[in-house]
Image (cartoon, rainbow, N blue to C red):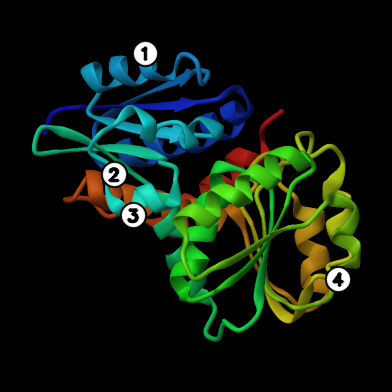
């Protein structure tokens, strides 16, 4: 088997988490007999098309991280319906000589939540913090599970409202409302699931307003997709109010296991071992 060359293309904000995550994954693959080489590349929305063309010409597999994931689809004519509805991609997979945008985070969230949560209150709403690429995948996953009411908040009110209007055009029979930052602490506990997609330092201090968890009903699900820095204090507070907590590390492990399954069909990732090593790698970031 030839050495697999793969690349992760990310924005600058995702650089630290992406380096820890994908170098850990590459090392685990190598130790398991899958010869591979990872290249980490930063890009911007303006340079994305050039970066994608270069990657498609020189690599066997492509991963995409951060906000640029929302801009990938506009550079492709052949977009799977599922990716088009989500509105973002976190990988390009080659099949039949063509590159296809895929969103493995969408499936990773589904697998993480369904495998650990036996009962979901689908009649409740979902509170989502952050108008991000990761939020697109999370909303798509929870809509697939059967949730029909979503409350979206973002410190950047104009971006958050635009995000909601975009979602309304791609998700039918689903209700979306934008929640201004100052209204978060006044929300009633009618949401059976809450999802955070913002990392500390890029939240304008608004993460502090989630600590009350007034928006989450008793025994609700709390999903934090932030990887660096980890919002561990927020997750502990969620546990303190009785929520079931699914970590971003666990979701990332499910997501990467699915990617490996699709791109390295003869190899199965030891998800628990990877999850443990990824956790250690993220906590060692300076």
> Residue at the location (52% across, 29% down)?
19
Q: Earlier in the sequence, mark 3 or mark 1?
A: 1
Q: Which mark is residue 247?
A: none
The answer to whether marks 4 and 1 mark residues whose Cβ atoms lie closer than 8 Å is: no
Disc 3, SS: helix
- Position above or below: 192 against 100: below
Task: Of the two numbered discs 3 and 2 on the same chain, state the one appearing first in sequence.
Answer: 2
Q: Position of residue 207 (x, y in %)?
A: 82, 49
Task: Judge from the rendering whether residue 232 lies leftward or rightward of residue 279; answer left or right.
Answer: right
Q: CA distance from mark 4 to mark 1?
A: 45 Å
Mark 2 or mark 4: name the one nearer the start of the chain.
Answer: 2
Number of other residues with Cα within 10 Å of mark 2, as a class: few under 14, some 14 to 19, many 20 or more: few
The residue at which mark 3 appears reads as 82
Front of the two marks 4 and 3? 3
Whole-number angstrom distance, CA of label 3 to CA of label 1: 25 Å
Whole-percent x and y of residue 28?
A: 38, 41
Task: Give yes or no for contact between labels 3 and 1 (Cβ–Cβ under 8 Å).
Answer: no
Q: Residue at x 80, y 57 (%)?
A: 234
Contact, CB < 8 Å: mark 2 with mark 1?
Answer: no
Residue matched to label 1: 50
Q: CA distance from mark 2 to mark 1?
A: 33 Å
Question: Is 34 on the left-hand or right-hand side of 207?
Answer: left
Mark pair 4, 3: CA separation? 33 Å
């Amino acid at each position: 088997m030839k050495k697999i060359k793969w690349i992760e293309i990310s924005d600058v904000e995702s650089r630290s988490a992406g380096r820890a995550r994908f170098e850990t994954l590459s090392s685990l693959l190598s130790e398991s007999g899958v010869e591979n080489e990872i290249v980490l590349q930063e890009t911007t929305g303006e340079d994305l098309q050039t970066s994608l063309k270069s990657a498609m010409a020189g690599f066997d597999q492509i991963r995409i991280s951060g906000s640029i994931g929302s801009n990938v689809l506009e550079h492709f004519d052949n977009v799977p319906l599922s990716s088009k509805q989500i509105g973002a991609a976190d990988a390009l997979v080659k099949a039949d000589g063509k590159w296809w945008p895929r969103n493995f985070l969408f499936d990773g969230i589904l697998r993480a939540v369904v495998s650990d949560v036996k009962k979901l209150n689908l009649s409740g709403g979902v509170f989502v913090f952050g108008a991000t690429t990761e939020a697109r995948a999370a909303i798509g996953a929870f809509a697939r599970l059967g949730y029909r009411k979503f409350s979206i908040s973002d410190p950047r009110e104009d971006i958050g409202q635009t995000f909601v209007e975009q979602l309304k055009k791609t998700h039918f029979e689903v209700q979306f409302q934008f929640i201004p930052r100052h209204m978060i602490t006044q929300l009633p506990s009618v949401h059976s699931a809450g999802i955070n997609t913002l990392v500390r330092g890029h939240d304008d201090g608004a993460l502090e307003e989630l600590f009350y968890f007034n928006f989450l009903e008793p025994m609700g699900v709390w999903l934090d997709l932030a990887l660096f820095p980890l919002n561990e204090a927020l997750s502990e507070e969620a546990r303190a109010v009785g929520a079931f907590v699914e970590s971003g590390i666990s979701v990332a492990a499910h997501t990467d296991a699915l990617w490996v399954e699709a791109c390295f069909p003869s190899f199965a990732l030891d998800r628990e071992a990877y999850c443990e090593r990824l956790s250690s790698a993220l906590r060692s970031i300076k």
